[in-house]
Each structure stands twice: as structure tokens, then as C-alpha cells.
Amino acid sequence: MGMDRWSALSMIESANCDTAVGNVGEITRFQIRPELWPGGNPRDAQAALAIAQRIMTKRIASFQQSHGREPSDFEFYVLWNAPAQINHPHHAVAVRAHRFVNLVSDNDTPAAASPPAPSAAVSRKEG
């Protein structure tokens, strides 16, 4: 059985490290951009999860309105990491999204169920 989405996201973003700081100042185990962090202790795993879930609730609602369905695991990761790239993720984002799918899928669900990784270019983290 695979991980839940939040555990997989934390694993990929920071290896579950509550003190991680990203290249552009992302904080928490979920690597939340500073401008999206409302304050409080970013090292508190429960607070980080609550904020990440609040951010994703909005992004998923927008996705559902546009696409008329829930996002796949692949799309969930892209929504977190690079929401502006949801329809055409950069190669590096797609590679991480495939790793995310592998973490959340169980042995009966092939990773191939997610969209194939596109062949282009440079990643810019937006999540």
C-alpha cells in the first residue's frame, strides 16, 4: 500500500524535514513559499500540514471548476509545486510528479496511469 498524498508530498519536498529551507526561501516540510505562510512556527508539522491543506483546498477547487473532476495524483503534485504549469508541466516538475505518483500508488495501480513526462526544460518552483 502506498503513502497518503501528504506524507508523499512531505517526503519529496523536504524528506520530512521540518527545518528545511528551499532555494527561494520555502519553509516547512512542505516547502511553502514565504509569501503563502501566514505566520506561526514553520517547524510545527501539524501547523505546516494545516496550511498546506488550506493552500491545496483553493487550488483543487479551481482545478475542479476548470476540469470538472478531482485531480489525479500526478496533477495534485503539479498543483502543489507549479500550479501555473498544470496543463504543461516542465520536465523537472513532471519527473517529481511521477515520483510522487509512485509513492502514493499501491502495487495494483500502475504509475503509468499518470500523464507521461513532457520532454522540455527548466523547472521553476511555484508551490
Image (spheres, rainbow, N blue to C red):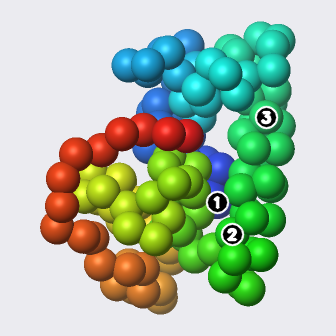
Q: Quadrant of residue 116?
A: bottom left
Q: Residue at x 22, y 45 (%)?
A: 122
Q: The N terminus lies in which quarter of the figure?
A: bottom right
Q: Quadrant of residue 29?
A: top right
Secondary structure beneath disc 2? helix
Please tell me the numbered disc located at residue 63.
2
Q: Position of residue 109 (x, y in %)?
A: 47, 86
| Residue type for callout 3 | Ile
Please tell me the numbered disc located at residue 4.
1
Residue 2 in sight from this viewpoint = no
Q: CA distance from mark 3 to mark 1?
A: 17 Å
Residue 72 in sight from this viewpoint = yes
Q: CA distance from mark 3 to mark 2?
A: 19 Å
The residue identified by callout 3 is 51
Q: Tell us which disc is closer to us: 3 or 2.
A: 2
Q: Tell us which disc is closer to us: 3 or 1.
A: 3
